[in-house]
Image (cartoon, grey):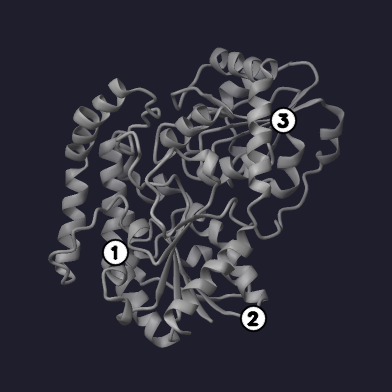
Amino acid sequence: MKIIFAATPIGGHVNPLLGTMQFLTQSGHDVVGYTGSTLRDSVERTGATFRLLPSDVDFDLRDIDKGFPDRASYAPGIERMFYDFKTFFLGTMESQYVGLEQLVDDFDADVVVYEHLFYGAVPLLLKERSARPAMIGWGITYLSTPRQDGAPHGPALPFATDEVTRKIYVDDAFPGATAALAPIQELYDTILRGLGFQNHASHFGNSTTLLADAFCQTTVPSFEYPQDQDSSITFVGAAPQIRSTTPLPYWADELENFSRVVLVTQGTVANEDFGALVAPSLTALAGEPDTLVLVTTGGRAVTDFPVDLPANARIAAYLPFDWLLPKINLLITNGGYGTVNQALAAGVPIIVAGATEDKPEVAARIAWAGVGIDLKTATPTAEAIRDAVTQIFENQEFAKCSAGIASEFQNYDSPAIFMQTLDRIAESRGF
């Protein structure tokens, strides 16, 4: 088959696709990766052909606040969310779509696989199925279909277990969130009207999920709230990873000398201020007996690290997670969805502190699933972190729940499930 993979030019959006791309190229399929120039090497390492986004949406988002300094002036929450959607997601829809439509024609594509925040796929999704390739969505963060308890997505509301809370969600929370997000929906509608879709009746929050011929969600059911799940949605477990080319750090052998190994990371996006999570984590765990603390800067230069490392800490710009995660006992993170699911697949409990992008919703699911502690802030104190670490190691329920979810992940062979999905679509479409 001829398959296009389309993604916003951000590492956290492209990386979850790479393992599947590599699997397909090695299985003899003709694969094209459609994204930004900064991800070209990543795409080509899978064996796929690279195709560049149009120049006006070929952003360098490796340091998002450096590239877009005005972004910091928008307060985290609705203001920052509207900026991001206007600049990186909805605002890029038309150009992404024009380039994708041309690529579909040039490549004679059978299937387009898109990460679910690639809005350039929406105009294709709105076309008659006979007038477009098969479309498969790839969920790179929490599932945004309607919750059974009536709560909106975004405010990170815990799953309701009683009728009183459900009524509050339905009567107050959902209408309030709808009103708050109205400007984003209006922008979405305006762009689609400009592309000729006057009466589409879709919602920006779930259109890329619900309009897909099939949608692959990269987690397991136990890490998602009960939802009225559409029949097109399939859980695929952890997104397959390509083998890391990051070399082992010089201190790799030291991990065997400690009974507790803790990884601290702020990911690759919200890592402009290591004082938010990494620094207080180091303070909290400095001198802890038999404990080694590992820090990854998410690509930032190690020499830029603003605090002195305690004697029991080690640091690296990147670390090979396929090697590392099975060796650690605890992850402290700001809640990137991909990292969290990789850790859960390895049975690692999590302490999470995140307040931007999708991170509060991811954090809420960590607490709900019993696999960790949500600190409910992006800037926890060292004392709060120390207390959470103590709880994780003293209360074996966290380890038990993490081990249970890890066992569930073992039952999901992501490449095999994706191929079943692909074959089912191919049969229904006659190719």
Numbered disc 1: secondary structure: helix
Q: CA distance from mark 1 to mark 2?
A: 31 Å
Amino acid at the residue labelled 2: Gly
Q: Image check: 414 left or right of 133?
A: right
Q: Is residue 328 visible?
A: yes
Q: In which quadrant will I find the N terminus? A: bottom right
Give 184 or 159, whichever is nearer the viewer.
159
Write the residue at 35% across / 49% down: 68
Amino acid at the residue labelled 1: Met
Amino acid at the residue labelled 3: Asn
Q: Decide: few, some or many residues near mark 3? Use Cα within 10 Å; few <14, some 14-19, many ≥20.
A: many
Asked if the residues shown at circle 3 and circle 2 are in contact, with their CB atoms under 8 angstroms apart, the answer is no
- The residue at which mark 3 appears reads as 329
Please give the label number shown on residue 380: none
Q: Decide: few, some or many residues near mark 1? Use Cα within 10 Å; few <14, some 14-19, many ≥20.
A: many
Write the residue at 50% across / 38% down: 271
Q: Decide: few, some or many residues near mark 2? Use Cα within 10 Å; few <14, some 14-19, many ≥20.
A: few
User: In terms of sequence position, does the residue under pointer 1 or pointer 2 come before the other?
Assistant: 2
> Residue 356, position in %: x, y?
39, 36
Q: Quadrant of residue 328?
A: top right
Asked if the residues shown at circle 1 and circle 2 are in contact, with their CB atoms under 8 angstroms apart, the answer is no
